[in-house]
Amino acid sequence: MNTKKIAFIICVNNDKYMDECRYYIDRLYVPEGYETDIIEVREAESMTSGYQAAMESSDAKYKIYMHQDVCLINRGMLFSMLNVFSDESIGIIGTLGGNLYPDGDVHLYWNKGSTLNAIYSDVKTYKFEQAPVYEEVEAVDGMFMATQYDIPWDQRLDGWHMYDVTQCIRFREKGYRICVSTEDNSWTLHDSGYCDLSVYDFYREMLFELYPDYFYDRKEIVKSDQQFEDDETSLKKLYLEIITSENDNYGHSKYENMPMEAFWDDYCTVKFPVRRMEFGFPREDWIYIKDWILQKRITVSFLFSVVNHVCRDPEHMATEIEKLFSEAEPKISVVMPIYNTGEQLYKTLMSVLSQTEKDFEVIMVDDCSTDELTRETERTFANFDKRFKLLAQDRNMGAAHCRNIGIESAAGKYIIFFDSDDLFCNDILAEMLATIEAEDADICIGNFMMLDIVSNVKSPIYATKKDGVTDRCFSLKELDENGLSYWMPMQGNKMLRTSFLRENNLKYQELSNCEDASFGYLSAIKAGKIVYCRKEEPLFIYRVNNSKQISYNVDSRNFLKAFSQLLSAIDVNNDKKTLLQVLTELKATAEPMISRCANKEYNDICRQGVKELIEEYSKYI
């Protein structure tokens, strides 16, 4: 017998409920030195046979027999349980129970303990007489039965009822006490629906036959119709209520022609994260309900209907969800200029929505798009998720102007600039945020994948492992004259501290192309601490040769304007190393940029201008 082991024993016939049950078990606080185990019993012939087999297979001293539809909402309940079991006279602890009476109507007398019970219409709190930690009873409800001794289950009970009562009797006959937890912070939420009482009298009769010393009063018990309401009837009421609500709000409901089973699957998919949110479980385990609204998997009406039925305090939770959809001051601001990217925009925004890091805002700056699909996509995201903010320009000003608007509007501690036709890998925000915060850096750089949408050729671009400083923070001043050649001024692979941009008044040069050159290089020059992202795999997909890109058409003269502005920002008398780095980069990148422009006149102007810049500034070195 392992005295430091706790086994959770669960008979399973519904994987969705079992997954949720396991979620809560996995997040319990486990006392130091103890270990836990989950034993799932499938295809058992009866509750007692399943529990008996599991009991015999486990060496755990402490065994918790529980239903698959029970959520252990008190993460510290194992500490409380072990504290109660420090009294060796206690054999079983439950969360709902009472005394037994000769008429065998056991459920009528469950009047002690502390638990929540969810039926289809609402959640009820059962908290009875005040007691310091626990209260002694004669039997407990089988939805949760914790034991510290192994006593055989009565396998004469061949079904799924009365096993709890008979096991409690067996413990008491061995001299052990039965009790219920009375903590204000209930250990359990039983998502039971309505009890199936159609076979209640059959199993009640078995109590008379098997335990006549305890049950002998065969009086007729009259029960209300509601007690006999079955799951199908209750579910149909819920189903019709939600269809009516959606029809009233939207004029239609997708559930009208949907099988009941599919409706219930959707309902459970939503109620589980809603419940996690109410009981204070980690944000990442429920925040995705916002994404479902935006993806139109569910409606707002559906969400609030679920809240109204599955939450202990629906009014409070409705307020919390409203706050969730209007949260401010995110960690990250994703700034995205948009112009007529149509169906590509949806894929781009969905790649942001799919991020594992959810604490972000997206500032969509529409550059006077004329495409209705683009505008509809923007409105859809902005209307259904408050993290997506639409700033529509009244005239076309270019990507640089849009990004500058984004810098001014950003509420996040960090900014990442992203084009509306590129794709985020789902962990780019999480990986870059973790790195930049860990190092307290001004800029974090990551690798990316270049995708030519014409040839469909993919080329990974590695910003790291070039300058020998990939394992620590650095500044440009530490690098040699080729320092800027490692940089790449494009923005999608960089996260920047918002305060750093504003303190240095860093803005994009408003050009039709090369608008990120001066901004990118100058941000590298000004940064006190730069760090490479710890994850080496590409973090986003940069699509090229896209005619819908705002900066698609190349004018080589803009390259000249970019470096002219960059050089004018350098203190040439006192910062000769930076000047040398800029001139080296100018010489190395001029011809490659000029080769991308088809206009010979523009190229001649650019070449002459580059030559003059080099001559003018070289005299300071």
Image (cartoon, grey):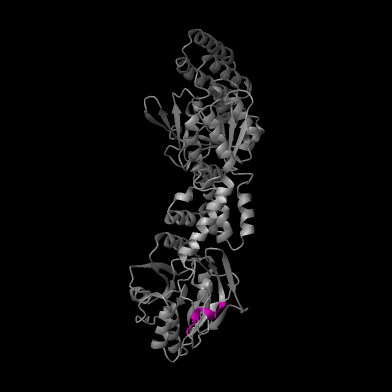
| Frontmost residue, 496 versus 581 | 496
Q: Nearer the viewer, residue 219 or 500?
A: 219
Task: Please identify the quadrant where the C terminus is shown.
Answer: top right
Report x, y in % for residue 446.
48, 36
Is any part of residue 36 visible from this angle?
yes
Q: How many marks?
A: 0
At 50% from the left and 18% from the top, the residue drawn is 553
Residue 148 visible at all = no
Q: Residue at x 58, y 15 (%)?
A: 617
Q: Quadrant of residue 48?
A: bottom left
Q: Position of residue 107 (x, y in %)?
A: 50, 78
Decide if residue 591 is on the left or right side of residue 1.
right
Please state the extent of the stretch shown in magenta in the rendering: 104-112
Q: Is residue 385 above or below residue 11?
A: above
- Establish if 467 lies above or below 140: above
Q: Is residue 554 above or below residue 10?
A: above
Q: Residue furthest bottom?
A: 213
- Is 555 covered by the magenta stretch? no
Q: Quadrant of residue 8?
A: bottom left
- Residue 523 at x, y = what percent? 58, 30
Q: Quick one: 167 or 181, which is closer to the camera?
A: 167
Q: Position of residue 564 (x, y in %)?
A: 59, 17
Foreground of the two, 262 or 491: 262
